[in-house]
Image (tube, helix red, strand yellow):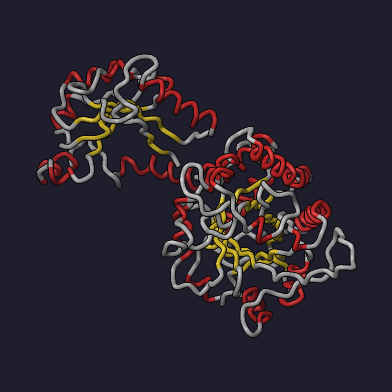
């Protein structure tokens, strides 16, 4: 989707922090720096760069002292809340060369006489609230009905607008990881292809029975989940050897992908102050002091180095999947807006969102992982001093997130959880994790935005103390508890025509996974 992007507006004035600095190393240099960052570092190619100044005079300097150069500008624009002097028009035309010019903000609309005398203005925009205040109705009618003014719906714009809409519709979704693997691109396209039409089924598994819950679904429903889920966070309570189980998870993930399942991996990490395996309560659900948190986010501190080693250890297993061309729905640091885990519940620039971005930078830029679809996972926001926080306070940003997911313990909520999460993610695809009760299928009739779900496993029974830990864990866990008959709830869920499983053709034209 193309965007008219007008950053650091009115930069020739001194009323914004970025403005009022003329010359080579002034406000124009900041504009060029932003251009280089967004275009070259973040590879954004959908922006129409609109350079903007205020009409000169008073606290606003001359246009030429703030112009960054035609290589950094697609459109030159002026804000004018007064008289449309010919000198303003001539000055901006003198800088523009062959580039278009525009009136980015006006109070009173330019008259037809002004537009005739200054015909190069490509567009004008009346500032919010001033259309009625500064413009008599008869003047607005005269201008908007003028022969040279084009409005929405004008037949003269129809072909161009349809071409833009078609380009936006046909463009495949791009992962946030630059130069992502082809497999990751196809996975994201698959998610978008299902979104709004069907919901992909998924089953999370336990570290002590890496296939147990998935096998239980097959036994109960006769269908295989479309998504195989596991967790690379291994704790002491699991009673297994960390490296052996992680390796077993990788091998099972390869097998599942070969059999056409998607792979989802979460990471409930131990505190970086602790060695693995660590305990759930004291480590995963523990806390860091404010001093430790600051050290964690500060490069080259002892704690930051421990964290880097922890991340790089997990990256070894993700790298194996990349080498095998297996894309992964990667869901690290779940429920960062909650208060359950050491990484969660910290607002601000150096809060939980900063840690997520730091993890992204480490895995992508240092460890070279290009097979991950990054899923930011939250819990439903609550109310009160100890409640789960608002999404906006913990969201790492659209440039670090491909999809969003929500862990739900009570799916009978009367609120549209899908809508609020989708809005938080700017319309990116969303999934839901059922941490407790399995919902009635009617839940998906009301909440149609979920692209996938993952049902949590029941904890497996503890291993017998006399038996040595083995790479492949023993017994399967019990099915998720949802009602007096959880097996029936599972059958009803998988029988819903909206739910897509392996080998079952999606309804309403969605693509089969």
Please identify the quadrant where the C terminus is shown: bottom right
Count of labels shown?
0
Frontmost residue, 137 versus 287: 287
Residue at the spot x=89%, y=62% of the render?
468
Tell which of 204 and 466 is nearer to you: 466
Residue at x 63% of width, y 35% of height: 301
Decide if residue 270 is in sight here: yes
101, above or below 469, in the image: above
User: Is residue 174 something that shows in the picture?
Assistant: no
Is 87 drawn above or below residue 397 in the view shown? above
Could you tell me residue 261's position as x and y percent? Answer: 72, 59
| Residue drawn at point x = 45 percent, y = 51 percent | 393
Quadrant assignment, res 377: bottom right
Q: Position of residue 265 (x, y in %)?
A: 69, 55
Answer with left or right where residue 83 lies relative to residue 27.
Answer: left
At x 62% / y 82%, what residue is drawn? 483
Front residue of this view, candidates 59 and 499 = 59
x%, y% of residue 423? 44, 55
Q: Position of residue 84 (x, y in %)?
A: 16, 27
**Rendered view: 6 above or below 468:** above
| Residue 145 placement, left or right of 491 | left
Q: Quadrant of residue 100?
A: top left
């Amino acid at each position: 989707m193309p965007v008219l992007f007008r950053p650091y507006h009115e930069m020739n004035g001194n009323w914004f922090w970025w403005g009022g600095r003329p010359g080579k190393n002034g406000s124009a240099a900041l504009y060029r720096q932003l251009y280089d960052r967004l275009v070259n570092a973040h590879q954004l190619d959908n922006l129409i760069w609109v350079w903007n100044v205020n009409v000169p005079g008073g606290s606003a300097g001359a246009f030429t002292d703030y112009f960054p150069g035609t290589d950094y500008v697609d459109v030159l624009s002026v804000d004018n809340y007064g008289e449309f002097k010919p000198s303003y028009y001539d000055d901006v035309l003198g800088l523009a060369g062959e580039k278009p010019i525009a009136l980015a903000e006006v109070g009173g609309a330019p008259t037809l006489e002004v537009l005739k005398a200054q015909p190069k203005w490509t567009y004008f925009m009346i500032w919010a609230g001033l259309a009625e205040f500064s413009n008599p109705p008869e003047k607005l009618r005269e201008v908007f009905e003028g022969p040279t003014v084009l409005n929405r719906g004008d037949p003269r714009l129809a072909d161009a607008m349809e071409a833009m809409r078609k380009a936006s519709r046909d463009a495949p979704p791009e992962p946030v990881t630059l130069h992502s693997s082809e497999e990751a691109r196809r996975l994201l396209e698959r998610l978008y292809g299902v979104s709004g039409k069907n919901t992909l089924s998924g089953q999370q598994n336990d570290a002590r029975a890496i296939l147990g819950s998935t096998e239980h679904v097959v036994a109960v429903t006769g269908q295989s989940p479309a998504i195989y889920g596991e967790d690379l966070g291994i704790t002491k309570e699991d009673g297994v050897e960390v490296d052996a189980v992680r390796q077993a998870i990788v091998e099972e993930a390869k097998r599942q992908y070969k059999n056409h399942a998607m792979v989802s991996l979460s990471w409930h990490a131990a505190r970086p102050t602790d060695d693995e395996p660590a305990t759930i309560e004291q480590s995963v659900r523990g806390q860091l002091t404010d001093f430790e948190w600051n050290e964690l986010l500060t490069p080259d501190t002892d704690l930051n180095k421990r964290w880097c080693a922890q991340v790089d250890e997990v990256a070894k297993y993700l790298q194996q999947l990349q080498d095998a061309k297996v894309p992964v729905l990667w869901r690290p640091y779940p429920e960062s807006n909650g208060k359950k885990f050491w990484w969660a519940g910290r607002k601000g620039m150096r809060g939980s969102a900063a840690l997520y971005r730091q993890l992204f930078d480490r895995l992508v830029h240092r460890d070279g992982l290009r097979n991950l679809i990054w899923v930011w996972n939250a819990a439903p926001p609550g109310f009160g001093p100890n409640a789960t926080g608002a999404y906006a306070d913990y969201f790492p940003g659209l440039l670090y997130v491909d999809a969003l997911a929500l862990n739900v313990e009570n799916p009978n909520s009367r609120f549209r959880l899908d809508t609020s999460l989708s809005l938080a993610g700017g319309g990116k695809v969303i999934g839901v994790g059922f941490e407790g009760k399995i919902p009635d299928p009617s839940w998906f009739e009301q909440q149609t935005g979920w692209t996938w779900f993952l049902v949590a496993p029941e904890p497996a029974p503890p291993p017998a103390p006399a038996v040595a830990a083995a790479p492949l864990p023993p017994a399967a866990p019990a099915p998720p508890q949802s009602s007096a008959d959880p097996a029936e709830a599972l059958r009803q869920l998988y029988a819903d025509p909206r739910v897509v499983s392996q080998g079952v053709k999606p309804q309403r034209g969605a693509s089969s996974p």
